[in-house]
Amino acid sequence: MRRRLTETSILLVSVVKWFFLASVVGLLVGGSTALFLWCLRWSTDGLSVIPYHYAILPIALFLSALIVQYLAPDAKGHGTEKVIEAIHQRGGVIKPLVVPVKLLATIVTLAAGGSAGKEGPCAQIGAGISSTLAGWFHFDETDRKKLVICGVSAGFATVFGTPVAGALFGVEVLAIGQLQYAVLFPSFVAGIVGYQISTAMGTTYFHHPISFIPTFSEFFFFKVVLGGVAFGLVSLVFIELLKLTERLSERIHWWTPLKGLLGGALLLVTLVLGDRYLGLGLTTVESVLNGQSVGMGYDPFIKMAATAVTLSFGGSGGIVTPIFFIGATAGSFLAWMFGLDPATGAALGMVGTLAGCANTPISASVMAIELFGASLSPYAAITCVVSFLMVGHRSVYPSQILAVAKSSSLSPDLGNTVERMDDVRITTRDVSAFGLGRKALKRLRRRPEK
């Protein structure tokens, strides 16, 4: 009995401790995120009224690369990846200077029209503030990591207005196929508090309940599964394009800010097709979620290219907002092909592509509920899980740890990062569907012609 009372007392103290710490993190991150979003909106609106303001894109990417290279190299690229890397490889230690540098570089990039997202800086805001607090309180490595994860959750929750999905994202994005249950409670607290603080400071969010959900039928359900397969393949294309563009950038042996000039010039080429591929692209996302047609089926791929160029050639920002554009436009186009409601297709594509690109099917499914309403949730869950499986052991976050194999017929290097993963080995079992199919195919090939 005494042992049970001791255990309960320890857990009660732990709950109180992490409730207090997570609330502080949520308060600070919510306020900082609201301030960042206000600065981003102010700078973007201010430049948008200037004729031909996209012409400054090469200069903007030059300045972004210059700021990051000489002030805080860890702020390079999309911020969430750097946070994951810090948690796994540096015990959650993040230099305080990374936060203001990332914010400034991202505002410069997005205000001029660079194709990136706003969640990366917010994740680094949360992680940087949490890491600094952990240093002040002399936390050990375990508690520091937990606090930094709370900061990531709060940043994601406050930037998109999804407190539950944001909390889950922070504990799900670190490893493929594994949730960090030890951090679940403080992450929820940080995400909810951060969201409430940001809302109280005047931040508004886009929530769009989908009114048209078809009646369940086997045919519609089959289309939903096919959509998940398609969004997984779209995610795979984006992941590979990001890696290809990064390799191309590394082969150009220029001073990094000069690469920003080249990247900005390449982005200007997309204006031939319109300006919807530049900046955050939220206007296009909202239009397709309202049921409007996106036009051509190449929209997702042009946005992929614009984002890859921005992040590989000096630009700074997140990657989730471009994923929303890619997924929503792809879903709208597939809905037109399948004869479905375009808004429903766009919503499924948005969360399905996020699940595939980031390997976060649970948080993406919950996000569908928070953004689009509970009626979409069964179909969103199926779409997200299928997309997560189809993308394989790849990710837009190369520092993710491989915790499980997505199929018993695959043998990835578990415990290693996606970036260092060896080629996936296929270990076909005789009784597996894949193995039986191969046997049947071999028999057909060996059958003599009459």
Image: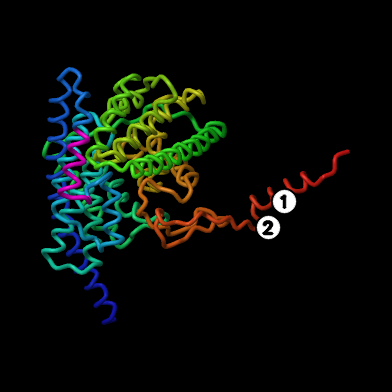
Image quadrant containing the C terminus: top right
- Principal secondary structure, stretch drawn in magenta: helix
Location of residue 111 in the rendering, given as x and y in whole percent from the top left corner: 18, 31
Q: Position of residue 211 (x, y in %)?
A: 37, 27
Q: Nearer the viewer, residue 141 or 154?
A: 141
Quadrant location of the N terminus? bottom left
Badge 1 density bin: few <14, some 14–19, many ≥20, Cα 10 Å = few
Residue at the farthest front position: 253
Q: Is residue 276 visible?
A: yes
Q: Work out whether 316 lies above or below 1.
A: above
Q: CA distance from mark 2 to mark 1?
A: 8 Å
Q: Which residue is mark 1?
A: 439
Which image quadrant is residue 201 in? top left
Along the horizontal axis of the image, is 122 left or right of 276? Answer: left
Q: Looking at numbered disc 2 in the image, what kind of residue is underneath it?
A: Asp
Of residues 164 and 141, the one nearer the viewer is 141
Q: Secondary structure at mark 1?
A: helix
Q: Residue at image x 48%, y 38%?
A: 233
Q: Is residue 8 positioned above or below 435 on the image?
A: below
Mark 2 vs 1: CB contact within 8 A:
yes
Q: Residue at x 35, y 47 (%)?
A: 363
The range drawn in magenta is 60-74
- Element type where label 2 sits in the image: loop
Look at label 1 and name its amino acid.
Lys
Residue 62 coordinates in the image, percent (x, y): 20, 36
**Percent x, y of residue 99:** 16, 49
> Along the polypeptide, which appears first: circle 2 or circle 1?
2
Return the residue at label 2: 430
Specify whether residue 61 is painted magenta. yes
